[in-house]
Amino acid sequence: MKFKFKEERTLEQRKGEASKIREKYPERIPVIVEKEPRSQIQPLGKRKFLVPSEISVAQFMWIVRKRIQLTQVQALYLFVGKSLPQSSATMYEVYERHKDEDGFLYIAYSGENTFGSCDNE
């Protein structure tokens, strides 16, 4: 997936921004979260997050879920690259394994109705 954040800024700009963030907030992870283009789910109000390094992927997913205001029947999937990160992993672990050369961790999200639609009844 191509991230708009990368397209709007040069590599040097992104590196500089991530470096400043990590200097100022060493216990936090700079994360860019964008909607997978084909997903029908609502877009987030923002895409930059400064996440505590010790929280789990599951906890971060809850934060994203809350911001999108998903219904109970909608699932949320977070992708790092082309894979789903383990929900018990800390954001620091995911960051260390998957951070981009610019210093940001890029996460795409998508969703679907897990219980189908009630329109057919």
Image (spheres, helix red, strand yellow):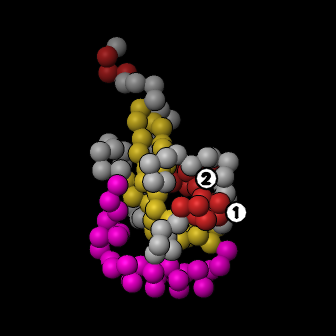
**Residue at position x 37%, y 21% in the image:** 118
Nearer to me, 12 or 36: 12
Category of crowding for the residue at label 2, using alpha-carbon neighbours closer than 10 angstroms: few (below 14), some (14–19), many (at least 20): many
SS at circle 2: helix
Marker disc for residue 54: 1
Q: Position of residue 32 (x, y in %)?
A: 45, 65
Does residue 8 show up magenta in the picture? yes
**Residue at position x 62%, y 46% in the image:** 87
Q: Position of residue 29 (x, y in %)?
A: 58, 70
Amino acid on which disc 1 is placed = Glu
Does residue 100 show up magenta in the picture? no
Q: Are marks 1 and 2 in contact (CB under 8 Å)?
A: no
Q: Position of residue 72 (x, y in %)?
A: 50, 35
Q: Residue furthest right?
A: 54
Category of crowding for the residue at label 1, using alpha-carbon neighbours closer than 10 angstroms: few (below 14), some (14–19), many (at least 20): some
Q: Of helix, strand and loop, which mostly describes the magenta segment?
A: helix
Q: Is residue 49 visible?
A: no
Which residue position is annotated with label 2? 57
Residue range (magenta) = 1-27
Q: Quadrant of the C terminus?
A: top left
Marker disc for residue 76: none
Q: Quadrant of the N terminus?
A: bottom left
Q: Is residue 90 left or right of residue 119?
A: right
Depicted 52 relative to depicted 10: above or below: above
Q: Position of residue 20 (x, y in %)?
A: 53, 85
Q: Is residue 15 visible?
A: yes
**Residue at position x 45%, y 81% in the image:** 15
Q: Residue furthest top?
A: 121
